[in-house]
Amino acid sequence: MLYRVFPHPQLTCFLLLIWLLLVNNLTVGNVVLGLILGIAIPGITQPFWPNRPKVARPLKAVQYILLVLWDICVANIAVAKIILFKTNEQTHSHWLTIPLELRSPEAITVLAGTITMTPGTVTAMLSADAQHLLVHCLDTDDPEAEVATIKTRYESRLKEIFE
């Protein structure tokens, strides 16, 4: 019974929190409206989630989020240095093909999003067989090392979280 009312309890809590942050006013009415939205939106969208992704290790997911936030901060500084102090001739951009071990569509989406959110890299395409990601790297002298870093730093952690 509880599952029918709250098909995605974490999403309900998340939507309530986002609603309260958006309105920036903690009142009973805003909490009630946030709860209504938090219950209605997952209920309406439940048919589009036939196979919900399972997060095997939620604590690892929190660690992954903190790691990505740290990497975004560090990459912002690195990209600023590239833009401010390197000429076009000194910048070595490359297209990288990253072979994937991930099979979950959700995990692949999180990996592609992580790469895109990190300044200096952008995911351009997923191969038709979902075996490779095409990534553009703004500046690297060793493309193989960049691929290895993405696989060890992000993909291996996502395998632990989703599989």
Image: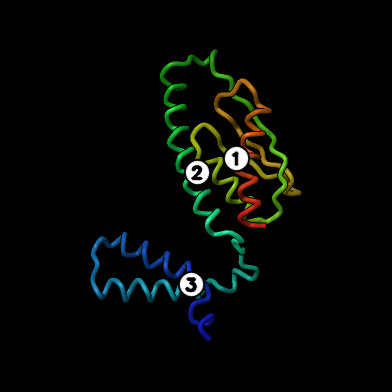
Q: Nearer the viewer, mark 2 or mark 3?
A: 2
**Tag 2: Cα neighbours inside 10 Å, few (<14), some, or many (≥20)?**
few
- Relative vertical location of residue 7 with respect to residue 85 in this rendering, above or below: below
Question: Residue 35 lies in what quarter of the image?
Answer: bottom left
Please name the residue that numbered disc 1 is placed on.
153
- The outermost residue toward the bottom is 1
* Disc 1: CA contacts within 10 A as few (<14), some (14-19) or many (>=20): some
Label 2 sits on what residue type? Leu
| 152 to the left or right of 72 | right
The Cα–Cα distance between marks 2 and 3, rounded to whole angstroms, is: 25 Å
In the picture shown, does residue 63 fall above or below 41?
Answer: above
Q: Secondary structure under badge 1?
A: helix
Kindly indicate whether the residue at mark 2 contacts the one at mark 1 (C-beta within 8 angstroms): yes
Q: Which residue is mark 3?
A: 9
Can you give x and y, in whole percent of width and height, for residue 47 in the image? 59, 74
Point out which mark residue 67 bears: 2
Q: Which residue is found at the position 45% from the left and 43% from the top?
A: 69
Callout 3: few (<14), some (14-19), or many (20+) C-alpha neighbours within 10 Å?
some
Q: Position of residue 32 (x, y in %)?
A: 32, 76
Q: Position of residue 68 (x, y in %)?
A: 50, 43
